[in-house]
Image (cartoon, helix red, strand yellow):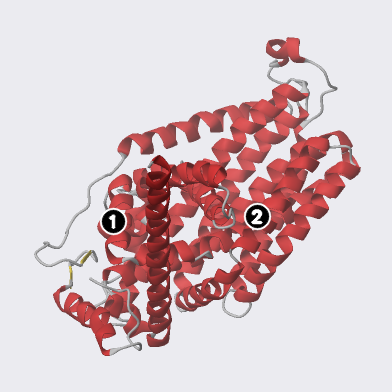
Amino acid sequence: MSVSQSPSSSSEDSGPVATAQQSVERSGRSGDGIISMSPGVAPVTSRHWRDVFWLGIFVMHLILLGLVLGVLGLNRFRKQDRLNIDKYTAGFLENQAGLTEDYWPLYAVAGGVGTVIGWTWLLLLGSRATQMMKVSVHILTTYLAVISVLCFWGEQVFWGVAFAIGAGLQFLYVISVIDRLNFTMLVLQKAVKMVWNLPEVMRVACAFMIVMLLWLSLWSFGAAGVVASSMGDGGRWWLLVVFSVSLFWTGAVLCNTVHVIVSGMVFLVLIHGGREAVSMPPNPLLKSLRYAVTTSFGSICYGSLFTAAIRTLRWEIRGFRSKIGNNECLLCCVDFLFHLVETLVRFFNKYAYVQIAVYGKSFNHSARDAWELFQSTGVEALIAYDCSGAVLLMGTVMGGLITGTCAGVWTRIKYPDRVIMVCSTAMLMGMILVGLAMVVVESAVTSLYICYAEDPLLIHRWDADFFNQMSETLHQRLQHRSARAREVLTHSRLDDQIQESNGA
């Protein structure tokens, strides 16, 4: 189908609506709430377990890591070397040992601050979410710069340089996408409108934050035991890095589980014309939850390993690529990285979770189908222009920085030599807790794009003005791409002619 024209620009631009009407007429719903958007495709009545290998890996990782965290935390709880582990690390002894309960309250502060920020964001979702996202975009650079200065003041040169680089990259990224922020905020406002009318999905986010807090209580117990151990700083850092990678994966899995649940709900609401529609299947939230934590959970575990890192890298490369100018050598290198990341995005993208929620496919199958759908309809140009994911990530990072700062201030007062260790891990805790709140909006954004690509009339029926603005922006982006392609082709031909004339 074609969705590249705005319905208001000319009589020929009514193609998307007409095509969408035909698509809606042939779409159907099975008794299990699974949508069939293509003619001749039988409704799916059952789901199969997908990516079971990664489900097993994730569960085994949780069990083993939980045991290790419990042992390390217990070894220093109320008694030094309770389990007589220090004899195995005798070669690494450098610092005076402490107790787990010395540092565990510091992580409790981080968990509490992160939870309060996340729940506050959910409470303000309907009235102040847009303002909060704008603040995140414009204040994050300043906050990173201030932390960098504080790190240099505390003689933490490495972290000072790291935060300074982060502030510089954030500033360059915002400058490179400043012209896209108006459209991005429009998309985010509509996504907020959608989830605000689905209070049950916000209750799901709160429930998963509680689940995350339960795991964080064990994780921080073990991390506090590591910080209090008699190992040298090198050993401590290696263990904390391993634990942090595990926590990142676990947090990503919980966030993407919420992503699948919310995506399934939003898709059903759009496809049926409202949550109160007669055609809505019974208990849609419970069905989405059941699928997310059973048959589709392996796909969620698999995708959570890669999507966040690849998506962040793609944002940075796109922003940097747009500001290079005429430096052909640098442009060639960046183009190589850009095409490499674009290939990875084909198999690892956040839109796969909508396909997982609706159709129950494996992760790679879902990611490939979603990307092919966007490319065949031209909607990929609109997605590349939108920065909503980056804006939400900025809000998540801001929440993590505030959490880390609060924990760091108390740590500096009590244990000045452990500030960086506690701060960095507390920041990760805060990012995960705030991310669980942010993901409800991101899920709505991805569902809106999937629905627009599959059936534009679904968006037109839900919000006609938004549909017109999306179609107009898409039309402009496709024209822009065509103009750039013609410019590249013209330059290539001129270069060939110059070479031929020089050779003659």
Q: SS at mark 1?
A: helix
Report the residue at 39% width, 40% height from top: 503
Expressed as whole percent of the image width and height from the top left, the position of residue 129 reads 61, 74
Mark 1: amino acid = Glu
Rendered image: mark on residue 344 = none
Examine the rendering and report whether any part of residue 406 can be seen. no
Q: Is 318 or 440 nearer to us in this picture?
A: 318
Rendered image: mark on residue 397 = 2
Q: How many marks?
A: 2
Mark 2: amino acid = Val
CA neighbours of label 2 inside 10 A, class few (<14), some (14 to 19), many (20+): many
Q: Quadrant of the N terminus?
A: bottom left
Report the residue at 56% width, 59% height from top: 390
- Which residue position holds label 1? 372
Mark 2 vs mark 1, CA separation in Å: 31 Å
Q: Earlier in the sequence, mark 2 or mark 1?
A: 1
